[in-house]
Image: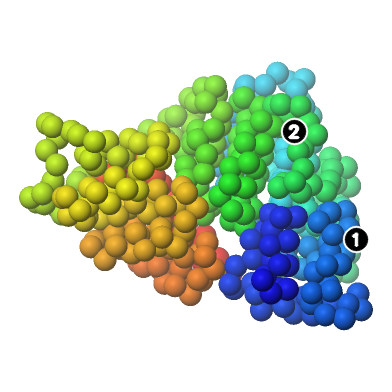
């Protein structure tokens, strides 16, 4: 193994971050600078210098360069709008007035998300009488120091509505400083999500934002992190992931709840809030009829398995196994189904999802390609293809697929999966929103 390969593995073991192909050039530049700064005679000597201990001072320098820190306040505005209009009112109804509402921004970087949360909480009339606090955690100490200052540049505050900018910030030269009345409610703490357990009791938080963090981890690490989130989340609480992240492919510990423009997640013990349920019902009645219609390729395929005699290779049974997490031999059975009955876009979609569940993203890409080849307007197949390409770091190809999805859905076209409901797949509006979000700078 080369010194660079050993370093990449060491970075993943210590931080959980997977270095993909698109990051290699940047990593090489960072490492060259650190080799010079540490007076290491070679790359291998620098790798040997790095102890597998995140408290090693050199990790602080390295981590600050290999983790993404560019963000801005109110990024992903649909989620903050849903938070203000549905989630906070629901929490206020569910919790006694003396309860302190505790919020966790996991992977808070330089504090843009934590500051946004503080503003949204301060603005909520529903929380009058409630105390609230925000915890921001990140693996990068340098980022946490910047976050603690509460100072943000012009780009970081460019999406803050002017009245809120005036109400909650003080202009300091070229920067805007969050007022102390909000800063004093935010605590920042270093936390390595892969290696550390958050030292809090079960059910400590009523709201957790884990946005655009899981995409940097491998599937087994994602599951461990989500298990920790579920442990730390209170029963009536909410978890938000990034707009291009979905929990269905990683863990079924929490249940999806549909909100305006986005999904969030709750414990199974949480009763759906009536206001949220009414919103979900309205959304479903607006969905085009074609979303529930079976694509013509399935209506006319002569080799379809008769519904009256379901067997071990009935596609509906395989859908049930995928939904319920029965992955044993699932890919082999899907291959056997396609061998016996002919390939189809739905079978290829299920195959791709089963590969995704096992962390074999490259095989998933090939399966999704098969689905799209057989049905070019199959928007679920094309969307998951884009997601997998993005996960592999093949950004140019991913962007092309996202644009195809956007073009299909914006024009009112596109065919969904027949099994979208059984598998809790994102609907037409959600796929469009996530595809647009994926193309944000």
Q: Position of residue 411 (x, y in %)?
A: 30, 63
Q: Earlier in the sequence, mark 2 or mark 1?
A: 1
Q: Position of residue 270 (x, y in %)?
A: 55, 24
**Which residue is found at the position 21% from the left and 39% from the top?**
314
In the rendered structure, are the residues bearing label 2 and label 1 in contact, judged by CB atoms less than 8 Å apart?
A: no
**Which residue is found at the position 54% from the left and 36% from the top?**
265
Residue 335 in view: yes
Q: Residue 76 appears in which quarter of the rendering? A: bottom right
**Which residue is found at the position 47% from the left and 49% from the top?**
358
| Most foreground residue, 286 or 439 | 439
Disc 1 crowd, CA 10 A, few/some/many (<14, 14-19, 20+): few
Q: Residue 323 appears in which quarter of the rendering? A: top left
The mark lying in front, picked from 2 and 1, is 1
**SS for callout 1:** helix
Q: Which of the colour schemes (rainbow, by chain, secondary structure, one colour) is used?
A: rainbow
- Residue indicated by mark 1: 57
Q: Position of residue 68 (x, y in %)?
A: 70, 64
Residue 108 in view: no
| Most foreground residue, 183 or 314 | 314
- Residue indicated by mark 2: 102
């Amino acid at each position: 193994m080369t010194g660079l390969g050993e370093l990449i593995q060491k970075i993943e073991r210590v931080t959980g971050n997977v270095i993909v192909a698109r990051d290699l050039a940047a990593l090489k530049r960072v490492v060259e600078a650190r080799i010079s700064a540490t007076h290491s005679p070679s790359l291998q000597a620098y790798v040997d210098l790095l102890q597998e201990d995140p408290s090693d001072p050199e990790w602080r320098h390295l981590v600050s360069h290999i983790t993404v820190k560019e963000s801005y306040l109110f990024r992903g505005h649909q989620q903050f709008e849903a938070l203000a209009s549905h989630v906070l009112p629901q929490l206020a109804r569910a919790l006694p007035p003396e309860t302190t509402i505790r919020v966790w921004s996991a992977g808070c970087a330089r504090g843009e998300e934590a500051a946004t949360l503080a503003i949204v909480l301060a603005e909520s009339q529903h929380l009058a009488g409630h105390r609230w606090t925000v915890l921001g955690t990140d693996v990068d100490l340098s980022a946490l120091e910047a976050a603690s200052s509460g100072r943000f540049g012009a780009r970081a505050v460019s999406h803050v509505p002017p009245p809120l900018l005036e109400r909650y910030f003080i202009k300091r030269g070229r920067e805007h400083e969050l007022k102390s009345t909000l800063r004093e409610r935010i605590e920042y703490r270093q936390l390595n999500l892969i290696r550390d357990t958050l030292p809090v009791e079960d059910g400590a938080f009523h709201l957790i934002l884990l946005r655009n963090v899981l995409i940097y981890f491998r599937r087994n690490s994602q599951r461990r992190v989500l298990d920790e989130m579920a442990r730390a989340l209170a029963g009536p609480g909410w978890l938000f992931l990034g707009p291009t992240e979905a929990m269905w492919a990683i863990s079924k510990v929490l249940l999806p709840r549909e909100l305006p423009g986005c999904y969030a997640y709750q414990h199974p013990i949480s009763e759906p809030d009536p206001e949220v349920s009414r919103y979900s019902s309205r959304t479903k009645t607006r969905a085009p009829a074609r979303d529930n219609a079976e694509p013509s390729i399935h209506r006319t395929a002569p080799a379809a398995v008769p519904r009256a005699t379901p067997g071990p290779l009935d596609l509906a049974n395989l859908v049930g196994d995928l939904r319920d997490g029965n992955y044993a031999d699932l890919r082999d059975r899907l291959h056997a189904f396609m061998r016996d009955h002919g390939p189809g876009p739905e079978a290829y979609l299920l195959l791709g999802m089963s590969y995704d569940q096992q962390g074999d993203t490259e095989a998933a890409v090939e399966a999704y390609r098969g689905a799209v080849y057989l049905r070019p307007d199959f928007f679920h197949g094309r969307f998951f293809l884009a997601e997998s390409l993005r996960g592999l770091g093949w950004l140019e190809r991913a962007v092309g697929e996202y644009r195809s999805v956007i073009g299909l859905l914006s024009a009112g076209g596109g065919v969904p999966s027949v099994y979208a409901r059984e598998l809790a797949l994102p609907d037409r509006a959600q796929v469009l929103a996530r595809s647009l979000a994926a193309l944000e700078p």
